[in-house]
């Protein structure tokens, strides 16, 4: 079995590659990644020596390049993680989100169709459903919840989902699609909430919380997301959409306070800053279809996962210190408009 994993130098894709190489010693994996600011090959150092693994630098939007790669490698399966993934960046510059997330998906689908692959799996997100009200804890996103994206990021992911579904119906491509809740774990880029809080708390810097901090996210440990994708690839039905989640909802403020407590840092580090435009209130995903039909379940709850994650950031400061230097500091200043 030969897999093309796109975006494999990013947070979740790199975990997925390591997970699959370890579990299936006879699978070959090619990692196609553009190495944008979010791509980091350091994360895949362990895989480099594996003869079943190969890295190729390239852009999923470049059809000639992608076609050439398919011609050479003759893939059986495509798993598309490649994306611009940060909501705040999509608010300040939507353009690249449309290019990578929509046009890139279309290129992959076109080429997958030409080469008759056995399965195309699209990595989507719960954000395509929009948000839920804070005062209705009985509501959850189901696979048939209408798409109602709020940000340029989630709109681009929803558009890609629609293309995947349309290509399945029109051209009969063997697709599956998964929509997962917020991931966290080691090697998470420090622009996202959890690694941002941990790294700033360790260095005693202010922690920017948007609005009143009461927005709710549903957290899943990254390895549980990877085991769910593996399960869908092997047992999922063609043309089906599967929600992935751990039922671990927390307000942002609760997450911040948990991390500060674990690191023994004062709550005075919390700085309430201007809200994110269009800020989604609550995400909560119902993944009972995946449990009932394919027997998948998460293994790590938030209490355990957040401890493992904090410990990793404490012990691997060089990994994130190299990221939060240089150009990245300019992003902090621009995003939060204050010297926090
Ligand atoms: P990430 O930003 O850490 O990684 C994205 C990777 O894609 C990077 O390595 C980047 O270099 C690569 N990439 C970007 N543009 C590319 C292009 N044009 N061609 C080739 N490679 C390109 O993202 P992540 O958090 O690992 O998310 C991976 C996928 O999972 C995304 O599709 C995202 O929408 C989805 N997702 C993420 C979460 C989450 O909480 N992080 C939750 C649900 C779904
Ligand atoms: O500085 C911050 N302060 C803050 O209060 C940041 C960066 C975030 N937040 C809030 C906004 C959200 O309510 O924390 C919450 C989480 O924010 P992000 O980490 O940016 O994640 P989110 O917007 O929920 O999107 C994530 O989950 C779904 C991923 O980034 C997406 O790629 C995925 O699809």
Image: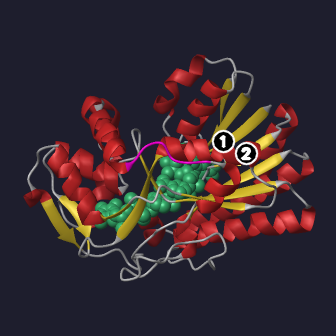
Q: Which residue is label 2 attached to?
A: 233
Q: Which residue is found at the position 75% from the left and 51% from the top?
A: 236
Res 37 seen here: no
Q: Are marks 1 and 2 in contact (CB under 8 Å)?
A: yes
Front one among 72 and 235:
235
Q: Which residue is found at the position 33% from the left and 57% from the top?
A: 193
**Quadrant of res 203:** top left
Res 277 seen here: yes
- Would you say 139 lies left or right of 232 here? left
* Residue 332 horizontal/vertical position (percent): 29, 57
- Would you say 46 lies left or right of 117 here? left
When the figure is inspected, residue 221 is found, relative to residue 160, above or below; the finding is: above
Q: Mark 2, residues whose alpha carbon is within 10 Å: few (<14), some, or many (≥20)?
A: many
Mark 1 lies on a secondary structure that is helix
Front one among 98 and 122:
122
Is 297 in the magenta? yes
Q: Which residue is found at the position 34% from the left and 42% from the top?
A: 304
Q: Which residue is label 1 attached to?
A: 230
When the figure is inspected, residue 138 is found, relative to residue 109, above or below; the finding is: below
- Would you say 259 lies left or right of 124 here? left
- Would you say 176 lies left or right of 301 here? right
Q: Mark 1, residues whose alpha carbon is within 10 Å: few (<14), some, or many (≥20)?
A: some
Q: Is mark 1 within 8 Å of ligand 1?
A: no
Q: Which residues are magenta?
A: 296-301
Q: How is the image coloured?
A: secondary structure
Front one among 56 and 124:
124
Q: Quadrant of the N terminus?
A: top right
* Residue 34 horizontal/vertical position (percent): 60, 44
Q: Which mark is residue 12?
A: none
* Residue 156 horizontal/vertical position (percent): 61, 69
Q: Which residue is found at the position 84% from the left and 50% from the top?
A: 112
């Amino acid at each position: 079995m030969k897999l093309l994993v796109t975006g494999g130098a990013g947070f979740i894709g790199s975990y997925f590659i390591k997970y699959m190489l370890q579990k299936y010693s006879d699978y070959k994996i090619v990692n196609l990644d553009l190495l944008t600011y979010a791509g980091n090959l350091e994360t895949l150092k362990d895989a480099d020596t594996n003869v079943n693994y190969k890295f190729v630098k390239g852009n999923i939007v470049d059809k000639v390049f992608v076609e050439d790669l398919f011609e050479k490698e003759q893939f059986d399966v495509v798993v598309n993680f490649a994306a611009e993934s940060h909501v705040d960046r999509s608010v300040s510059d939507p353009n690249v989100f449309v290019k990578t997330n929509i046009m890139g998906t279309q290129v992959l689908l076109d080429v997958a169709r030409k080469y008759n692959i056995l399965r195309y799996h699209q990595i989507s997100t719960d954000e395509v459903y929009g948000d839920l009200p804070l005062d209705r804890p009985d509501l959850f996103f189901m696979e048939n919840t209408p798409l109602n994206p709020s940000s340029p990021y989630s709109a681009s992911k929803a558009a890609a989902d629609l293309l995947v579904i349309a290509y399945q119906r029109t051209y009969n491509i063997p697709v599956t699609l998964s929509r997962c809740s917020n991931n966290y774990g080691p090697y998470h880029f420090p622009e996202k909430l959890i690694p941002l809080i941990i790294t700033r708390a360790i260095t005693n810097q202010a922690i920017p919380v948007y609005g009143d901090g009461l927005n709710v996210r549903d957290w899943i440990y990254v390895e549980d997301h990877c085991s769910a994708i593996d399960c869908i690839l092997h047992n999922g039905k063609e043309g089906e959409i599967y929600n992935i989640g751990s039922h671990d909802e927390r307000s942002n403020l609760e997450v911040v306070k948990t991390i500060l407590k674990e690191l023994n840092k004062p709550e005075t580090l919390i700085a309430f800053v201007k809200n994110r435009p269009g800020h989604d209130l609550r995400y909560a995903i119902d993944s009972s279809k995946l449990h009932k039909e394919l027997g998948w379940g998460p293994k790590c709850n938030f209490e355990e996962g957040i401890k493992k994650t904090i410990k990793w950031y404490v012990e691997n400061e060089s990994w994130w210190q190299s990221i939060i230097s240089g150009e990245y500091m300019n992003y902090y200043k621009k995003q939060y408009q204050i010297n926090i």
